[in-house]
Amino acid sequence: MISVFIHNSFVNEKKYILDFVFGEVFCVEYQLVIDNIKSYRFVDQLNKFEIADSFFSELKDGALYYNDKNLVPNSVEFVDYPEFGLNATPVLFGKGDLNVNDGNISLQNDLIAGMFFMLTRWEEIAISKHDVHGRFVESENLSIKYNFNKRPIVNEYLQLLMELLNKSGFSRLSIKRDYKIFLTHDVDDIARYDRFSKIIKALAGDLIKRKSINTFCRSIKDSYKIWFKSYPDVWNTFDFLMDISDKKDVKSRFYFIPGMLGENDVRFNINSNEVKLIIDNIKLRNHIIGIHPSYSTYCNQEQFILEKNRLAKYDVVLEEGRQHYLRFKNPQTWQDWDDCGFKTDSSIGFYENVGFRSGICFSFPVFNVKTRMQLNLRERPLIVMDTALRRCAKTKEDSIILALEIAEITKKYQGEFVLLWHNSNLSVNEWSGWDNVYNKIVESI
């Protein structure tokens, strides 16, 4: 058994990372030993390996590091570890030095603090800059500033740690996981032309915003078919999405806003007969229903519970979902999800970029930095969102290439590729032709 010796500061934080690394990723038993030496030492009967404790050991135990923006790295060093196939590895805390003396190996790159920083997202509390929706401003994200947002650096750290332990002579460690695909669909609206006011809004958008007579005429034609010929609405794409998922032998996950018309940014009534028919069809086809808590649930657990109960009336097992607009406040949003009994959140993703906001490409247990406790909740990070993909690519073809590039990186680390594609962003007006883009991406990932 491996013994891991740690400095007697921030034991809960260190144990959270070490439990994840050894108990879940490496799947081996370890024992934790606490002393007053400022390093992480990995020891068995014959071998020893050491990592510098450059962050936590320099703070007073219990200090509110997450409130101090000066503790967020103000520069990032990139170091090559060619013997382990890693190049330009970001060093968030400590230094990049790797020393080998008489068979003893020590690393000055504080991987433990680096993983904790990325997984807990405490930089988003420390910097505390938000947009009009209350979201952390992406340009302030360290991985965006230093252009490593398309790299799952926690996975790279795990790979490096495993290789170093193996090189130090420990029993051969490995990371055994299966690459998985999660196709998710936030249902912000179920119909484009179900109310006269929405038809007028769509037509005005065609003329004023899109400046297109062709789309204006198409909108008139579509709304006529829907209202007078009983055609399905152009945003009723649920069967299309499930058909593609069935071909891939995966489940579509539909996250519904359990709102009522009149509530903030709610565009359909969760109790309507139209929603019931859609949900019944999804259940019949054995796909998955989740929750997409409305705009008003941000830092409002009472509203969150109300909406959970509304959706639960459809006799569905509610275990997962994602915040509307990715409105996330750390750690309150995670705590709300945990308190409400959900197993998995998938809100941690970029709204203007693609990649790995939490630095990892598979799900992980959540840690509340304020209570210093691990929650029962897990985070399954969002990796690619349709609207963000369009912002990052110039053409439809570029969008396919970029999505597949990120998927290949995820596959390299046997991760979970989480794709968000809204049911309304497929074939209408400004999204004309994107149903083919979605299909090609899913076929190839």
Image: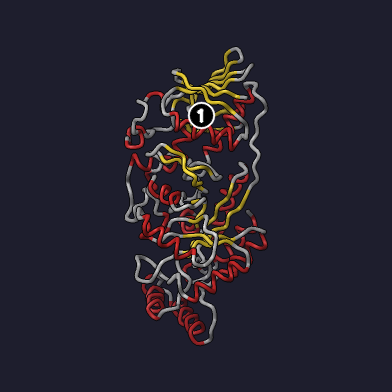
| Residue 388, position as x, y percentages in the image | 46, 55
Residue 91 appears left or right of 21:
left
Q: Position of residue 286 (x, y in %)?
A: 62, 64
Residue positioned 39% across, 47% down in the render: 138
> Closest to the observer: 416 or 270?
270
Report the residue at 53% width, 21% height from top. 41
- Give the class, few, some or many, for how many residues have Cα within 10 Å of label 1's Cα (few <14, many ≥20): some
Of 381 and 217, which appears nearest the observer?
A: 381
User: Quadrant of residue 315 in the image?
Assistant: bottom right
In this picture the colour scheme is: secondary structure
Say left or right for 55 vs 178: left
The total number of labels drawn is 1
Secondary element at tag 1? strand
| Quarter of the figure with the N terminus | top right
Query: As drawn, which residue projects farthest toward the bottom?
Result: 228
Q: Which residue is mark 1?
A: 79
Instruction: Report the front residue among 93 and 220.
Output: 93
| Residue type at tag 1 | Val
Q: Position of residue 198 (x, y in %)?
A: 40, 76
Q: Residue 235: image x %, image y %?
A: 50, 72
Residue 421 sits above or below residue 228 on the image = above
Q: Is residue 326 above or below residue 43?
A: below
Residue at image location 57% in from the left, 20% down from the top: 49
**Which quadrant would residue 304 be assigned to in this image?**
bottom left
Q: Toward which corner of the image does residue 195 lie, by quadrant?
A: bottom left
